[in-house]
Amino acid sequence: QVQLAESGGGLVQAGGSLSLSCQASGSIYVINTMGWYRQAPGKQRELVATITDGGGTNYADSVKGRFTISRDSAQKMVYLQMNSLKPEDTAVYYCNAYVSTATHHWSAFWGQGTRVTVSS
């Protein structure tokens, strides 16, 4: 099995910054795309940013220029640096990874989520 553990959420004032981290562990053969998604109260989960094993990135329009995704493939970690935070960034942020397990079966895995609250 594969586990994703997020950390770094919290409460911040508008205009501030937070950094999220996610550690993947378990029966991992290789990780392809890693990413961050978020779910605000009463809304559907949405993509925030993804990064491929080759370093290619994709961002939601709402976070472009403010958030930066990065990864350390050797350590099986993905990061999200969030700057110029807005109240509308308030959500639970989930780490996601597309993983080939030790049995060479590809699946998507999710972390438990970390809450980010931006006060106005």
Image: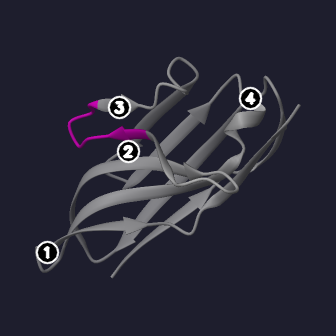
Provide the residue designation for mark 1: 105
Query: Residue at left 53%, top 65%?
Result: 5
Q: Nearer the viewer, residue 117 or 25?
A: 117
Q: Real-space Cα distance between discs 2 and 3? A: 17 Å
Magenta region, main secondary structure: loop
Task: Say what secondary structure mark 3 lies in.
Answer: strand
Q: Could you tell me residue 69's position as x and y percent?
A: 45, 35
Q: Residues within 10 Å of mark 3 (few under 14, many from 20)?
A: some
Q: Real-space Cα distance between discs 4 and 2? A: 27 Å
Q: Which of the marked residues, 3 or 1, is nearer the chain's N terminus? A: 3
Q: Is residue 61 above or below residue 89?
A: above
Nearest-to-viewer mark from 2 and 3: 3
Q: Which of the marked residues, 1 or 2, is nearer the chain's N terminus? A: 2
Q: Real-space Cα distance between discs 4 and 1? A: 39 Å
Q: Which residue type does callout 3 highlight?
A: Asn
Task: Say what secondary structure mark 4 lies in.
Answer: loop
Numbered label attached to residue 86: 4
